[in-house]
Image (cartoon, helix red, strand yellow):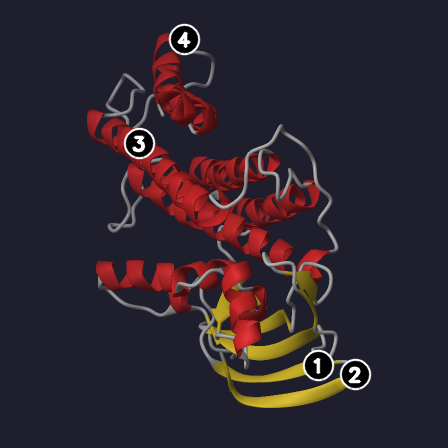
Amino acid sequence: MASTIQKTYLPFFRIPTALLTLICLNVNVNAQVSSRLPVPGYQDFNARIPDSNQAAIDFSPGTGQLVSGTRQRVWLIAGSHLAAWGASYIALNKAWYAGYPKSDFHFFNDNGEWNQMDKCGHTWTAYQMSRLSARLWKWSGLNERQSAWLGGAAGLAYQSIIEIQDGFSSEWGFSWGDMTANTVGAATFVAQQLGWHEQRLQFKLSYWPYDYNSPELVTRRDQLFGKSLPERMLKDYNSQTYWLSANVHAFFPGSNWPAWLNIAIGYNSNGMLGGYENKWTDKQGNTFSRYDIPRERHFLLSPDIDLTRIKTNNKFLRSVLYIANMVKIPAPAIALSKGKFKLYALYY
């Protein structure tokens, strides 16, 4: 049992452990070197972010070193990242990979599967992981640039670990398409934070259970996407819609457009009972062909709310709104599929 755990889990923990250790050491070393090796133009200073709800980077006078409170927060966030990675790795290994045997590391081209809904999921996850991670690094006392880079690195590293798991699974493999989608998600966050100091374009998700309207389809759903709601929320591409939500006011600050009102472009595909086609064979050897169920793509346009731009003095509520902003609110929408438009009074 011990050897199995060592072979299965420990190699993946080495990557984030080494990364987070280097991050924390770099924060401390940079501050110490700056004080011990003065150069022309170098000045010791006290730097503090003026916003009272943010943690500060505080350099003690004449030393250039991070104060102990900030250093402790950095290590706390680093440890939290490692714990979250470990817990999610174990959970995913149970929910996603447990039913399939391990294999030697291999590559897998899945770019045509699931009408690219899985790629949208990778992009959304990497973006949101980067966004939440950067927020935590900012709280620890790092400045905006450091927080953005570390957040993006954390989001990409998290997704990379999952991709490596795929590489050792007989059912899947390491996908360069997935890694490209992961990189797009993390880079979208970092580029906006460094360039605009805000997120004008955000990837969001909405979920509404797809109607599997026969026992045969319910069995197929459970086989593909799991029996529990948390599993299906993670895996069921038929029930997911991914959005790119744009804050119009941020692009046109002189306009009368409300600062909290966004316009979102969405993508969804349903009717998918397999990666490439609606034909499968069950464990008893029975073959099912459901080509009568169309695999349809839908492109949507809908208003959205940027919850982070709702003004409130309550710090807890600000945090709740920040986290909730990863999900698109239900709203009216217009959808385009196979050249036909359809209106929704409320699209989930």
Q: Which is nearer the eye, 234 or 7?
A: 7
Residue drawn at point x = 65 percent, y = 82 percent: 335
How far, Cα to Cα, is label 3 from label 1?
A: 46 Å
Q: Is residue 315 visible?
A: yes
| Amino acid at the residue labelled 3 | Gly
Is there CB contact under 8 Å for labels 3 and 2?
Answer: no
Q: Please provide percent x and percent y for residue 200.
A: 54, 60
- Judging from the image, what secondary structure is the residue with disc 3 in? helix
Task: Identify the residue at image location x=64%, y=39%.
Answer: 173
Of badges 4 and 2, nearer the viewer stands: 2
- Viewer-side residue, 347 vs 331: 347
- Residue indicated by mark 4: 37
Disc 1 residue crowd, few under 14, some 14–19, many 20+, Cα 10 Å = some
Residue where numbered disc 2 is placed: 339
In which quadrant of the rendered view does residue 286 lie? bottom right
Label disc, if present, on residue 79 of the rendered structure: 3
